[in-house]
């Protein structure tokens, strides 16, 4: 298994930027596909971005495409989510998720396919 710890959340003004990080344990990080999901109060947890384990192909929700960028550094066992042009509707708890050998556009964007989750980091965007 793998342990995930998010960091980098906080309070930012609308139009600002923030980068959240997810640090993973173990020495098999490169074999895990990684995803970012978010959940606002009263809403379902929704897909934000993902990056595949093999090809490095990235996927984005339509609501964040062009503003957010997911990346990974396998040498540091870390996945990042760079968030630019933040909007108040981006306010949520952001969760990192992992599943080994996960691939395919439909599979990698489905939260039900991820067995490993971090505890989340709060991102608040003020107007």
Image (cartoon, grey):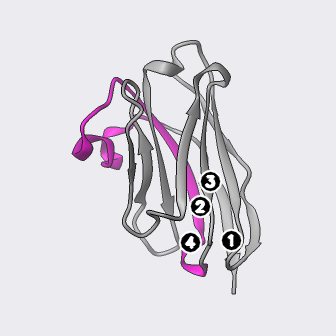
Say left or right for 98 vs 91.
left
Nearest to the eye among marks 2 and 4: give it.
4
Mark 1–mark 4 distance (CA, rounded to whole Å): 7 Å
Mark 1–mark 3 distance (CA, rounded to whole Å): 15 Å
Q: In x, y percent, where is residue 36?
A: 49, 49
The 10 Å Cα crowd at callout 2, few under 14, some 14 to 19, many 20 or more, is some
User: What residue is at 67 percent from the left and 77 percent from the top?
Assistant: 15
Residue identified by numbered label 4: 90
* The label number, if any, that marks residue 93 in the structure image: 2
Asked whether residue 1 appears in the rendered view, the answer is: no
Marks 3,2: beta carbons within 8 A: no
Magenta span: 88-116
* The label number, if any, that marks residue 124 in the structure image: 1
The mark that comes first in sequence, 1 or 3, is: 3
Q: In x, y percent, where is residue 53?
A: 41, 27
Residue occupying the far bottom of the picture: 127
Marks 3,4: beta carbons within 8 A: no
Q: Quadrant of residue 79?
A: top right
Q: In x, y percent, where is residue 67?
A: 53, 64
Circle 3: element type: strand
Is 114 inside the magenta-drawn segment? yes
Residue identified by numbered label 3: 82
Is 57 inside the magenta-drawn segment? no
Mark 3–mark 2 distance (CA, rounded to whole Å): 15 Å
Q: Is residue 68 or residue 116 the one in the foreground?
A: 68
The 10 Å Cα crowd at callout 3, few under 14, some 14 to 19, many 20 or more, is some
User: What residue is at 56 percent from the left and 34 percent from the top?
Assistant: 72
The 10 Å Cα crowd at callout 4, few under 14, some 14 to 19, many 20 or more, is many
Circle 2: element type: strand
């Amino acid at each position: 298994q793998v342990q995930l710890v998010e960091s980098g959340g906080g309070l930012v003004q609308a139009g600002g930027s923030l980068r959240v990080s997810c640090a993973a344990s173990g020495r098999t990080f490169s074999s895990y596909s990684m995803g970012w999901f978010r959940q606002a109060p009263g809403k379902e947890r929704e897909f934000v971005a993902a990056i595949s384990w093999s090809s490095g192909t990235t996927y984005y929700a339509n609501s964040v495409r062009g503003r957010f960028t997911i990346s990974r550094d396998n040498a540091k066992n870390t996945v990042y989510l760079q968030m630019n042009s933040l909007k108040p509707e981006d306010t949520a708890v952001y969760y990192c998720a992992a599943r080994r050998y996960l691939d395919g556009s439909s599979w990698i964007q489905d939260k039900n396919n991820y067995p490993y989750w971090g505890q989340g980091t709060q991102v608040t965007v003020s107007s």
